[in-house]
Image (spheres, rainbow, N blue to C red):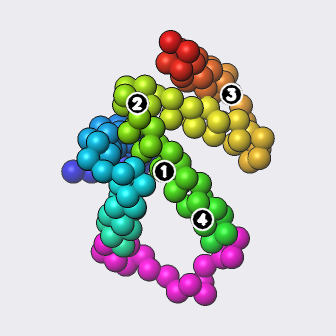
Amino acid sequence: MNIPANWQTFALASAFFAALTAIFGKLGVSEMNSNLATFIRTIVIVAITALIVTARHEWEAPTSLSAKGLTFLVLSAVATGLSWLCYYRALQLGPVSSVAPVDKLSVALAIVLGVVFLGEPLTWQTTVGGLLIVAGSLVILLG
């Protein structure tokens, strides 16, 4: 099977797996503490990613990695960890049909941050899409 290697394909796959994450996560956190669930999830992700990097021979010497790149990856990891901890706690407390869409406010926030900090262009399509996400989240939050 030849899967096209473009951003759209990977973005749609990400959305599909994120949807599964919500369902499986909701079922998992109903059986244990949300922080422990996040820890277990993290260990599994580390193991799977290590297997992929090993299978693809993508390991690099730490000295060949840029300090700036590593710094931003560490910051990204901290943000991811905090996001997951909050997400799993929200799943423990609320319905997945509300938690998952509100969590996707991150998309609208990423649009704004991309424009402000990365100088990315703000197209009418991106603006309308972001506003629809905000509107949908508000309907769920205020409903």
3D distance between C-alphas at marks 1 and 2: 14 Å
Q: Quick one: label 3 or label 2, which is nearer the N terminus?
A: 2
3D distance between C-alphas at marks 1 and 3: 33 Å
Q: Quick one: label 2 or label 4, which is nearer the N terminus?
A: 4
Q: Which residue is mark 2?
A: 94
> Residue 84 location, x and y as percent?
47, 50
Callout in the foreground (4, 1) = 1
Q: Which residue is mark 1?
A: 85
Q: Judge by depth and name the residue closer to the eye, 129 or 94.
A: 94
Residue 49, compared with residue 109, is above or below; it is below
Residue 109, compared with residue 64, is above or below; it is above
Residue lying farthest left? 1
Q: How many marks?
A: 4
Could you tell me the amino acid type at mark 1?
Answer: Leu
Could you tell me the amino acid type at mark 4?
Answer: Leu
Residue 77, compared with residue 25, is above or below; it is below
Q: Quick one: label 3 or label 4, which is nearer the N terminus?
A: 4
Instruction: State yes or no: discs 3 and 2 in contact (Cβ < 8 Å).
Output: no
Q: Quick one: label 1 or label 3, which is nearer the N terminus?
A: 1
Name the secondary structure under disc 3: loop
Q: Report the span colored magenta.
A: 51-69
Q: Which residue is mark 3?
A: 123
Report if residue 42 lies within the magenta region.
no
Q: Which picture quadrant has residue 38?
A: bottom left
Q: Which residue is mark 4?
A: 73
3D distance between C-alphas at marks 2 and 4: 30 Å
